[in-house]
Image (tube, rainbow, N blue to C red):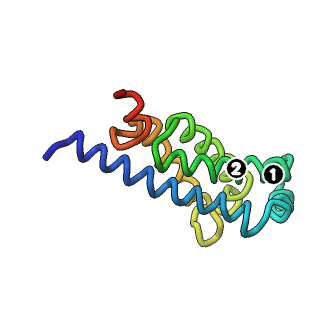
Amino acid sequence: MNRPAVRDFALLLLRLVLGTVFVARGFQHWFDTGMAQTGRDFAALGVPQPQLSAYLTGTAELIGGAFLAVGLLTTIVASVLTLLVLAAGYFVHLDNGFFVENAGIEYPLVLAAALFIIIVFGTGRASLDGVLTRA
C-alpha cells in the first residue's frame, strides 16, 4: 500500500465533499433563499450585522467551497470556513443542544473537525496548491 497516495486520495475526497457542501450552502444563500431573506433569518437568530453577515457568509461558502474543492489557497480558505462554522455554531446551534435534528451543535462540530484536518494535513498532491508548489 502506497501511504502517500492513500493520504492524497483521502484529502482529495474530504476536500471534494466539504467543497460541495459549502458551495451548495452558498448557492442556497445567494440564489435560493436570497440575501434579503438570509439577512432577515440571521437577524432573527441574533447574528450581528445580519445583512452584512449574510453577504459575507454566502460569499465565503460559495467561493471558499469552490476553492476548497479544487485545492486552491486551501489552508487560508479552510481557516476562514472554520471561523464561519464556529460562528454559526455559536449564534445558531449552541442553545439547541447537541443533535442535528434539533438544530444542535453536532453538524457544525463535524464540519469544523473536517476543516481542521485539512488545515493540519494540507491539500495533498491532488490539488492546485500541490501543482503550483511542484512547478
Q: Nearer the viewer, mark 2 or mark 1?
A: 2
Characterize the local packing of mark 1: few (<14), some (14-19) or many (20 or more) Cα atoms within 10 angstroms.
Answer: many
Front in this rendered view, residue 88 or 59: 59
**Residue position marked by numbered label 1 in the rendering:** 47
| CB contact under 8 Å: marks 2 and 1 | no
- Quarter containing the C terminus: top left
| Furthest residue toward front | 135
Tell me what residue is drawn at x 32 percent, y 50 percent.
10
Return the x and y of residue 133 as percentages of the image width and height. 39, 28
- Please state which amino acid type lies under the numbered disc 2: Thr
In this orientation, does residue 71 appear? Answer: yes
Return the x and y of residue 69 as percentages of the image width and height. 48, 50
- Please state which amino acid type lies under the numbered disc 1: Val
In this orientation, does residue 113 appear? Answer: no
**Residue position marked by numbered label 2 in the rendering:** 59
The CA distance from mark 2 to mark 1 is: 16 Å
Return the x and y of residue 128 as percentages of the image width and height. 43, 39
